[in-house]
Amino acid sequence: MHRTRTLTAAAALLVLSLGGLTGCNSSPAAQPKSHMTASDTPAPGSQSPAATTAASSATPEPSGSCANTSAEQAVNENIDKVGPAFPKGNVPDAEWVAIDTETYDPCADLSWVTLTIRGGTASSPSQQMLFHDGEYLGTTTQEGIAFSPATVRLSNSAIQVTYRWAKEGESNAGASGRAVSTYSWNPNTESVDHAGEWPPGIG
């Protein structure tokens, strides 16, 4: 009788022991995963979260609309395309030079560089080169205009030019004539639109 109770107790302890071991085992779902589950797997053509984070922190690529040329390069490469300062040829050695290249912008829809002749005076011919995204377009007028114009930027694609000219009987120093023109880049025609006035005889 005593031995039977002992065996019964031993069997009970064995069952409890086995049950306890099963309860302590972690299920496979609870194990740390070294791979992505189906919900973590990126769909074809998409990126994983890590790849997306890396891409968003990357430096954006240039848009490609800006020129690689500096103002000096843009002027030097195209200044020979500008018509002569004196079309009648009475000053054949007149040479165009840039007054200021800070107005050139390789990323602007429209920018400009004003020219005058080397060794000129205040009333010497002036001309303006126009650029779109750094690409040379041509000049604001067919011929040079006496006196350097006052030019201001209105927007990324438009500038306003105020020309000065001497009225009849006025000296160059006392020139009071004014003509205001606006030049705008037209994306539809990919050309420059002009509005306003020019000095007499200029166009």
Image (spheres, grey):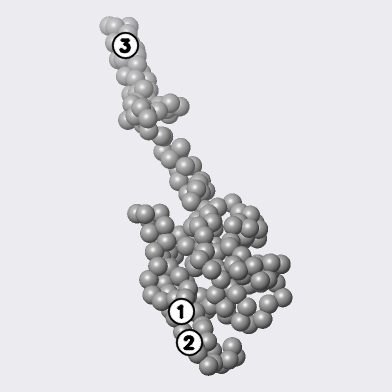
| x and y, in percent, of residue 72 in the image | 65, 60
- Is label 1 or label 2 in front? 1
At label 2, counting other C-alpha atoms closer than 10 Å, the crowd grade (few under 14, some 14-19, many 20 or more) is: some
Question: Percent from the top left, x then y, of residue 86?
Answer: 61, 70
Closest to the observer, 7 or 41: 41
Closer mark to the observer between disc 1 and disc 3: 1
Q: Residue at x 53, y 77 (%)?
A: 149
Out of 9 and 109, give the one closest to the viewer.
109
> Element under label 3?
helix
Residue 162, image x, y percentages: 48, 79
Residue identifier under label 1: 200
Q: Residue at x 66, y 71 (%)?
A: 90
Residue in front for this viewpoint, 190 or 14: 190
Measure the alpha-carbon separation of dots 1 and 3: 120 Å
Which amino acid does the dot numbered 3 rest on?
Ala
Q: Are marks 1 and 2 in contact (CB under 8 Å)?
A: yes
Q: Identify residue type, mark 2.
A: Gly
Q: Give the amino acid type for the residue marked by disc 1 in the picture.
A: Pro
Q: Is residue 194 left or right of residue 174?
A: left
Name the residue that disc number 3 marks.
11
Residue carrying label 2: 177
Camera sees residue 201: yes
Q: Tell me: residue 60, above or below residue 167.
A: above
**Reading the chain from its start, which is encountered first: label 1 or label 2?**
2
